[in-house]
Image (tube, rainbow, N blue to C red):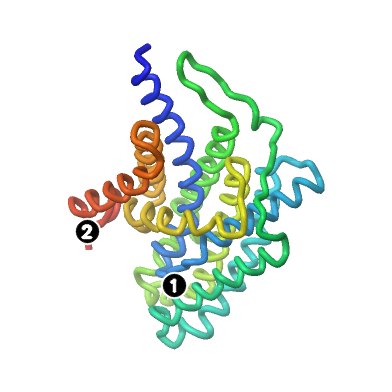
């Protein structure tokens, strides 16, 4: 096989696997930002919090890190629900969710990051999962299980979330809460309770993404900064509240970044990826799967 073609195919495969990680990180934000209109800038910081907790628990128990992240999901849900109660009480119910609410989540982000530095130190943490050193070779294409397993678990979780949102009464209420709150009240549904539940799900996915992240790469307290721009770009490119669009945009983002890094160097990959975002928004301002207003 031509070396350039082999490099391209490996870049595409690795990019798709990287996109699975991006999808896990962006799915929770698609709920809070796209469906609830809550600009949680601290979302990647909670992902890092999940990654570091998983790393510590893995060192203590030896359990699979992805299993640990699933077991931690209820705790992250409770954390998200409690955080939304604070946000709603002090900002949303007074109509201050725009600038003041954004500043609130900036503060939360720095509190989480500084708290992690104080608790576990500034050094990097990594999980050596049982399958991390295994690579499947399909002809000239390498498929590292270190990336395949987290991507598969993440996409399966997103699929389960999509089924919940589409086919359950509560899921449909979550999808509708930002569009017509008064209509929910007419159906005797408390929109604040629905938003509290949904924000908890958003942070549960941040914890799940953290478990996937720490399998793929070393993580320190400041690692969330790398993902802030990426996850917001993916959610916007995918159409804000569309989980399918979020996944497609994440996969495309991962492929563009990885292929660019393979051929032109890693310094070019963010510029090209965000250039693609601008191109998509120029053609479809509502995103790939967004609906026209």
251 vs 284, left or right, is right
Q: Where is residue 275 in the image (x, y as percent from the top left)?
A: 27, 49
Q: Nearer the viewer, residue 181 or 229?
A: 229
Q: What element carries label 1?
A: loop
Q: Earlier in the sequence, mark 1 or mark 2?
A: 1
| Residue topped by disc 2 | 292
Q: Where is residue 221 in the image (x, y as percent from the top left)?
A: 61, 59
20 to 280, vertically: above or below? above
Q: Which residue lies furthest to the top in this view?
A: 1
87 vs 273, left or right, is right
| Structural crowding at the residue carrying mark 1, measured as other residues with C-alpha within 10 Å and reported as few (<14), some (14–19) or many (≥20) | few
C-alpha span from label 1 to label 2: 26 Å
| Residue topped by disc 1 | 187
Which quadrant of the figure has residue 132? top right
Q: Is mark 2 on a helix, strand or loop?
A: loop
Which quadrant of the figure has residue 61? top right
Which quadrant of the figure has residue 46? bottom right
Q: Where is residue 109 in the image (x, y as percent from the top left)?
A: 54, 69
243 vs 193, left or right, is left
| Structural crowding at the residue carrying mark 2, measured as other residues with C-alpha within 10 Å and reported as few (<14), some (14–19) or many (≥20) | few
159 to 139, vertically: above or below? below
User: Closer to the camera: disc 1 or disc 2?
Assistant: 2
Q: Residue at x 62, y 62 (%)?
A: 77
251 vs 142, left or right, is left
Q: Nearer the viewer, residue 92 or 206?
A: 206
Q: Which residue is drawn at 70% across and 47% down?
A: 68
210 to 75, vertically: above or below? above
């Amino acid at each position: 096989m031509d070396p350039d073609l082999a490099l391209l195919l490996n870049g595409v495969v690795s990019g798709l696997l990287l996109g699975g990680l991006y999808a896990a990180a962006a799915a929770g934000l698609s709920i809070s930002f796209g469906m609830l209109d809550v600009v949680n800038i601290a979302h990647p910081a909670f992902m890092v919090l999940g990654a570091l907790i998983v790393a510590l628990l893995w060192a203590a128990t030896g359990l699979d890190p992805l299993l640990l992240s699933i077991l931690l999901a209820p705790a992250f849900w409770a954390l998200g629900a409690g955080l939304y109660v604070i946000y709603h009480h002090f900002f949303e119910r007074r109509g201050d969710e725009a600038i003041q609410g954004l500043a609130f989540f900036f503060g939360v982000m720095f509190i989480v990051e500084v708290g992690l530095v104080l608790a576990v130190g500034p050094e990097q943490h990594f999980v050596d999962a049982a399958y991390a050193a295994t690579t499947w070779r399909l002809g000239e294409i390498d498929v590292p299980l270190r990336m395949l397993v987290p991507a598969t678990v993440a996409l399966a979780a997103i699929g389960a979330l999509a089924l919940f949102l589409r086919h359950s009464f509560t899921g449909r209420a979550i999808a509708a809460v930002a569009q017509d709150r008064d209509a929910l009240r007419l159906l005797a549904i408390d929109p604040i309770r629905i938003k509290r539940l949904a924000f908890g799900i958003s942070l549960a996915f941040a914890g799940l993404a953290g478990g996937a992240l720490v399998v793929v790469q070393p993580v320190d307290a400041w690692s969330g900064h790398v993902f802030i721009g990426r996850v917001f770009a993916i959610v916007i490119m995918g159409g804000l509240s569309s989980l399918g669009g979020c996944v497609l945009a994440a996969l495309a983002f991962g492929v563009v970044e990885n292929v660019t890094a393979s051929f032109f160097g890693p310094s070019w990959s963010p510029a090209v990826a965000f250039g693609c975002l601008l191109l998509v928004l120029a053609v479809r301002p509502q995103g790939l799967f967004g609906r026209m207003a």
